[in-house]
Every structure is written in structure tokens, then in C-alpha cells.
Image: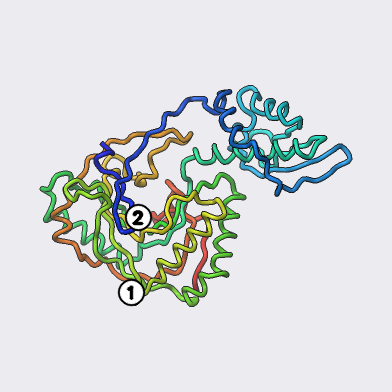
């Protein structure tokens, strides 16, 4: 069970287990009156920072949102929109399903328009957080030398440790997909992908160029470690990534990128720092070669899936390959990688990138 292999969180020099909590979900919770009412209790204090335009008919405000989320504002048989309109004394125009556009709120009173806008924002944020991750910011770690060394690592592990419980070829990462994740994203439209590209470009101009010096970061991928606290029951084994010159520049760069994206709302704040690692073995691959770690625990409609995992005994691997050297890389690009999609080279498809040099 997952409770026996919890994620570890380091706080103030101490390591704590983060036990998973499976929340109960309902098939049509977005259509439930009580659920809507609970959300609206969080939106009782309107935000005065919205741009509300006065018109000859009253007041008008627009909301940008991906079409995938329109249904949560409309509700079953239009009930949610009707409730919003009645309670705020406004009229809410929503583009038809599949059409991108703006939600338009109009009303005779400015306060009513602001109240409707606040409530819509709460609904959008709530249901956005229920969407599965679609993309992630990453460095590619699949240079030819590293792929060769990874395959050597896999060969030697299977040669020397295949008799250990749970160790077999199915749990190794695809060498073409070796990467370092900075943060996970939910991008629901082309506009949001473009917004992410623009945010990356701002990061480059404001601090990445200063940290990198306009040159690729030369790093080493060496040494292995495991995610949980029992080497006899391992689910994820990873290679460590660090600057070759011993500096902290890579960590500083990715942490500042993470902070900027969290502040913008494009990444939900979960961690204060990026763990520099490259997954090399993962027990989720045993049943699904395309699985993607803990981020593969939700269906397309956001429902939680419990996946039973068969851990492996990593004690001999850790002892024999503790300092295994995977190679040197020059990190020159941050990519917006798309989950479950590969390019012609077998790597995650990139929807955009920034280059250091």
C-alpha cells in the first residue's frame, strides 16, 4: 500500500513522511447545489482590483478562461450560471463549447458585476486544480553519452541484482526520456501555452541570463538515491544532478523559475525548492511503460486512481552503484514538455523552449 511508501518532506533539517490522503469525489460534484454553495462561501468578499468598464447600459467585465472549463460555469442544465445571475443581478455570456473567447459579465450595478466575477474566478480556480497535469518544465538529460552510460547501468544492475525482489528490466526509465523536472503545469489552451512561453522568456531576461552567463550550464549526472525511507522497498530510484564546478547556480536557477511560475498561478505551490534528480527506475513502469511517477494518479476528468505498486529491494543496487557516473551534460534549454506525447526522437514533445546561448 502507498501508506507504507510515503513521500518524504524535509523541514527544518528533519525528514517527515507525507502520507497520502485519498479525497472522496463525486461523479457530478460540480453540479451539486451544496457544493456550489460551499464554493460561494469562499467568494463573499469581492475583489476590487478587477477592470470593470462603465457602459450606457451599466457595467461590464470580462473573464479569460479556457473553453474546457466553461461547463463548470454553466452547470447542469445551466443551473450554475442561473444561480450566479440571480444572486448577483447580472447577465453572464459564455462562449459555446469548443469555442475560445471571453466570459462577459454585464449588470446595472458595479458591485454585482464584481461579485459575479469573484465567484466565477473561485469556480475556475477550483476546477482547474482538479485537472490532470498536461505539461511540465524540464531540462532534457538524454545526450548520447548519458544514454549509453544509462544502458550500461541497466545492464550491470540486471547482471548483478536481478535476483533481488522486484528487480527486472520493466522498471527502468526509457533512456530517450531522461529529464529533470522543474515543475508541473496544467495548460488547457494554446493561449496558456503561449503565456507559459512568454513567462519563460521573462525569466530568461530578468535572471536566467545573469545566472547562466549566457552559456550552457555544465552538469554531472552521478550517484543514485531513492525517494522513500526504506531501501528494501523502493519505488523510485534516481540519479543525482549537480553543477560540475560545484556551484549552486543550477539550484538557484530552477528555484527562481519555480517561484516565478508559482507567483503567476501557472504552477500550484507545493514545494519551495526543486529536487534536482533524474528518475532511472520507477515501479509504475512495471505495468505501464508510459507512467509518469506520482503525477499519473488521476484520470482525464481529475478522479483519483489508486495504483498498487510492487516495490523492489534496492539495497544491493545502492551498495554497488552508489557513485555510478552517468556522464556530463551541457544544459542549454528549458522546455515546455507535453505529457504522454513524444517527438520523432522518442523524447517528450516540446511545445516551446528558451535557450541560454
Q: Is residue 244 left or right of residue 116?
A: left
Give the answer, above or below, for where 337 lies relative to 131.
below
In this image, 347 relative to 350: left or right? left
Image-quadrant location for residue 279:
bottom left
Give residue 333's position: percent from left, percent from top.
46, 66
Q: Residues within 10 Å of mark 2 (few under 14, many from 20)?
A: few
In this rendering, position of residue 167 left or right of residue 220: left
CA distance separating discs 2 and 1: 27 Å
282 versus 35 height, above or below: below
Percent x, y of residue 260: 53, 59
Q: Residues within 10 Å of mark 1 (few under 14, many from 20)?
A: some
Asked which secondary structure carries label 1, the reply is loop
Q: Are marks 2 and 1 in contact (CB under 8 Å)?
A: no
Q: Position of residue 75 (x, y in %)?
A: 61, 27
Q: Which mark is residue 225?
A: none
Q: Is residue 277 above or below residue 190?
A: below
Q: Which residue is painted at 52% across and 73% down in the image?
A: 209
Total numbered labels: 2
Look at discs 2 and 1 and give the one toward the viewer. 2
**Secondary structure type for disc 2:** strand
Which residue position holds label 2?
Answer: 11
Identity of the residue drawn at 69% across and 39% down: 117
Q: If the image is split into quadrants, where does the N terminus sit?
A: top left
Q: Of 168 and 113, which appears nearest the observer?
A: 113
Compared to 331, does 156 lie above or below?
above
Residue 303: x, y in percent? 44, 33
Q: Is residue 256 left or right of residue 195?
A: left
Mark nearer the N terminus (2 vs 1) = 2
User: Residue lying farthest right?
Assistant: 56
Q: Which residue is mark 1?
A: 244
Amino acid at each position: 500500500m502507498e501508506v507504507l511508501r510515503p513521500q518524504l518532506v524535509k523541514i527544518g533539517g528533519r525528514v517527515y513522511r507525507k502520507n497520502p490522503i485519498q479525497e472522496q469525489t463525486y461523479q457530478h460534484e460540480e453540479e451539486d447545489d451544496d457544493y456550489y454553495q460551499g464554493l460561494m462561501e469562499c467568494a463573499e468578499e469581492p475583489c476590487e482590483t478587477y477592470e470593470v468598464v462603465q457602459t450606457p447600459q451599466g457595467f461590464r467585465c470580462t473573464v479569460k478562461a479556457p473553453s474546457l472549463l466553461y461547463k463548470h460555469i454553466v452547470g447542469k442544465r445551466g443551473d450554475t450560471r442561473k444561480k450566479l445571475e440571480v444572486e448577483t443581478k447580472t447577465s453572464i455570456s459564455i462562449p459555446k463549447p469548443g469555442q475560445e473567447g471571453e466570459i462577459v459579465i454585464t449588470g446595472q450595478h458595479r458591485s454585482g458585476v464584481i461579485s459575479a466575477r469573484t465567484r466565477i474566478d473561485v469556480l475556475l480556480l477550483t476546477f482547474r486544480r482538479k485537472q490532470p497535469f498536461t505539461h511540465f518544465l524540464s531540462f532534457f538529460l538524454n545526450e548520447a553519452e548519458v544514454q549509453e552510460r544509462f544502458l550500461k547501468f541497466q545492464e550491470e544492475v540486471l547482471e548483478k541484482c536481478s535476483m533481488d525482489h522486484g528487480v527486472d528490466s520493466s522498471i527502468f526509465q526509457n533512456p530517450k526520456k531522461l529529464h529533470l523536472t522543474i515543475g508541473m503545469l496544467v495548460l488547457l489552451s494554446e493561449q496558456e501555452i503561449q503565456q507559459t512561453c512568454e513567462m519563460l522568456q521573462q525569466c530568461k531576461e530578468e535572471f536566467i541570463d545573469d545566472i547562466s552567463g549566457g552559456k550552457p550550464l555544465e552538469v554531472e549526472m552521478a550517484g543514485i538515491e531513492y525517494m522513500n525511507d526504506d531501501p528494501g522497498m523502493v519505488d523510485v530510484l534516481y540519479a543525482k544532478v549537480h553543477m560540475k564546478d560545484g556551484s549552486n547556480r543550477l539550484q538557484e536557477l530552477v528555484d527562481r523559475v519555480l517561484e516565478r511560475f508559482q507567483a503567476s498561478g501557472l504552477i500550484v505551490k507545493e514545494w519551495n525548492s526543486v529536487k534536482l534528480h533524474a528518475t532511472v527506475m520507477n515501479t509504475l513502469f512495471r505495468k505501464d511503460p508510459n507512467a509518469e511517477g506520482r503525477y499519473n494518479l488521476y484520470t482525464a476528468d481529475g478522479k483519483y486512481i489508486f495504483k498498487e505498486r510492487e516495490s523492489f529491494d534496492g539495497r544491493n543496487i545502492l551498495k554497488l552503484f552508489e557513485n555510478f557516473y552517468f556522464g556530463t551534460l551541457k544544459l542549454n534549454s528549458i522546455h515546455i514538455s507535453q505529457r504522454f506525447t513524444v517527438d520523432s526522437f522518442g523524447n517528450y514533445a516540446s511545445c516551446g523552449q528558451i535557450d541560454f546561448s
